[in-house]
Amino acid sequence: MLAVTFSSVALSVVAAGSATAAQAVVTSPGGIVADGALHRVFVGDHTSGKIVATDYNGTLVDSVSGVSGVSDLTLSADGTVLYAAAEGSHQIVALDAATLDVRTRYTVATDVGPRYVAFAGGKVWFTYGDQWSGNLGSVDPSAGTTAGTTTARSLAAAPADASTSDPAPTDTPTADPTPSGDPTPDPTDTPTADPSPSDTPTADPTPTDTPTADPTPSGDPTPDPTDTPTADPSPSDTPTADPSPTDTPTADPSPTDTPTPPPTPPPTGDPTPPPADPVTLGQFPGPWPGIWGPGILDTNPSEPGVLAIGETGISTDSMSVVDVSTGTPKSTAWYFGDYTLNSGIGDIDLVPGSTPQVLVNGTQRDGYAGGKFTAAGAYPAGQRADIAGNGLVAQASGTNVAVYKPNTTQPLHTYAVGGTGAAALTWAPDYSRIFALVGSGSSSGTGYTVKVLTDPTKNAPILTVTAPATATRGKALTVSGKLSVTVPVSSGATLQVVRVDLESPQGKALAAVHPKADGTFAFSDTPPAGGTVTYKVSYAGDAAHTAVSTSRNVAVSRTATALSVNNTGKMYNYNTKVTFTARLGATYKNRTVEIWADPYGGDKPNKLLRSGTVNSQGYISTTLQLVRDTAITVVYKGDARSAPRTVRGVAYTRVALSTSIARYYRTGKIGSTSYYWFHKSTDPYVTTVMTAYPGRAQRLDLQIYYAGTWYAAGSQYFRLSSTGKSIVAIGAPGQSGIRVRVKADYIDTASGDYVNTSTYGAWKYLYFTN
């Protein structure tokens, strides 16, 4: 059973099987325990009052709500009953472990707790109380009760009350099965609480000890005479008023009074007495001041009937080991903490074995032989732990979980669980796995997942392999490494080696390797193929070791390959068909080449134009009609001896562009140049049409002729329509004799996109007259 200090942290239990397995999510931890009989793991959610159950793979199988403030969990010895400490409702809740149906709710008369629970000696033990009044209580599941209504009696009653009631030590009401007519309690339980034969009528076989056997015929024959004493309320019916048993005939051990019990009164009261209260408080057997706050509890299946208790109040260093095998706690060892033995207790675990010890905070071993605690050694630094019945220690340390054999310092098995590390650990009772609650480590703090750690009883070897980063094909190289273990492997241990390369993509087995006594090994190999060569080294494991494998890649050289493509780097008009021819030089085996075309712009994908075997001269060709700038890529993927090669070029493509003039009244030449003639007050319309593209604009250039020279009068971009058209009106000059010229251009990038190469239109000449 795991015992850790309760804290409010987010927890998420996630199925460890397939990606589609259901997840069990809790918001804060409320205990974790593994059921070996059902192969289930139970996790409590303190905030929501929910308990979830997963299988041994971590997959959600069931859940139940209504366990208010659940703070810890434990199981009955046979694993059939799950017990939960419900702080919110101050109850111990018993649930059917197979169905999670609530069997019984045991009310605990406290304002704080119950906090921690453990099952030992046939009872459920729990701790409760505030920082000044921490104590130990128990629930006896064998005692009769009705669900949800029991109220605890305290064994720590004030001395004044005890003396005024009955100073006899045999007056414990919860353990006195007086012949008051209550057939529910098993009288054989009486000696556990009160061995005095004077209070145990079953210890005297004479008929005078059994007033229910009064043969007088004067009584009412209808009621069962064995119920007669129920009309006279025994002290067990009224523990808070007068626990003295002197009101019942059984309180007087004198056999002379037994044959003459009081006359049987009419059955005017409840004919059925209440069952014996199964909840008992105030049972911590240690000396003053006891524990402060509800102490951490732990048991171990190899130490039945023993509890380890660690203090959790404002002072957290006191601890105790208690024997509860008889049902009555007896102190085995006690330490009144002064922080010289431990530095506070956040976790305590009972250590099985012939040497009495507890493990504190997953690190410090404290022995308690002779009733006193003394330092007994330590494991490497950790935070918390859980100890299996065979003594193996599962320790959380940082983001790792390590397994140690008893009293060793080298881990048997180490798991890198990641995240923020394991917040809690619990063993499967058959030692087949460990269940770790691992923090996600994300910035959002989304909680914890259940990670299932398998093969914890086997040593996990560490296998390292070293190989050169690069090598020359056909020349020998050396691979070396080490198999590191904390449990020695047999002298005949074998490592399997597989080489994966282009000639053997499924892998080729090489000669097996036998590590030396110190675990080191080395082997040589001559790679026949170039490219990435992978050497995989593996150890199959054995009864004491898990399997392990690792690999290293070596970049092995290949012969350079000649590859080219023509007709790139040139400019072509829109819609021109161009043939691209690739040429492949000499290679080892592969003679396949691919030609790809990737038009500029994100709306057109890279397209395979052709893939095929080159001809005897090494040529392969394909034709493409160009409408945009297009990247032409030729790919040769290489082979075992010829290096891969890729070449790339761009075929630049102009836009389709035309310009027309409107509103002129005639055309005519001035010199050798044709002009559009306009009246001096008429605005010319210039219409441009070019290849359409979203967001594209034309640039319109205007120049004026003066004294034999053309001067720039301005340039301006005008957005094209979705069909690639733009109409611009040029203002009339209002005077005659003016000569101007205009042209439209597409400017790569400046016109709003980059999918074509810059294209310049022809000048259009205009002349204004009267």
Image (cartoon, helix red, strand yellow):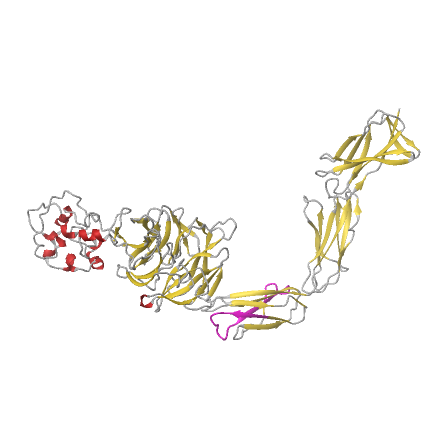
- Residue 414 magenta-drawn? no
**Residue nearest the viewer, comparing 396 with 51:** 396
Q: Residue 220 appears in which quarter of the rendering? A: top left
Q: Is residue 662 above or below residue 132?
A: above
On screen, residue 236 versus residue 692, left or right, reads left
Q: Which residues are magenta?
A: 480-508
- Residue 494 magenta-drawn? yes
Residue 433 placed where, x, y %?
Answer: 43, 61
| Residue 703 appears in the rendering | yes
Residue 363 placed where, x, y %?
Answer: 43, 63
Give the mark count.
0
Residue 373 placed where, x, y %?
Answer: 35, 65
The residue depicted at 59 percent of the width and 73 percent of the height is: 523
On screen, residue 734 versus residue 453, left or right, reads right
**Residue nearest the viewer, comparing 680 with 397:** 397
| Residue 387 appears in the rendering | no
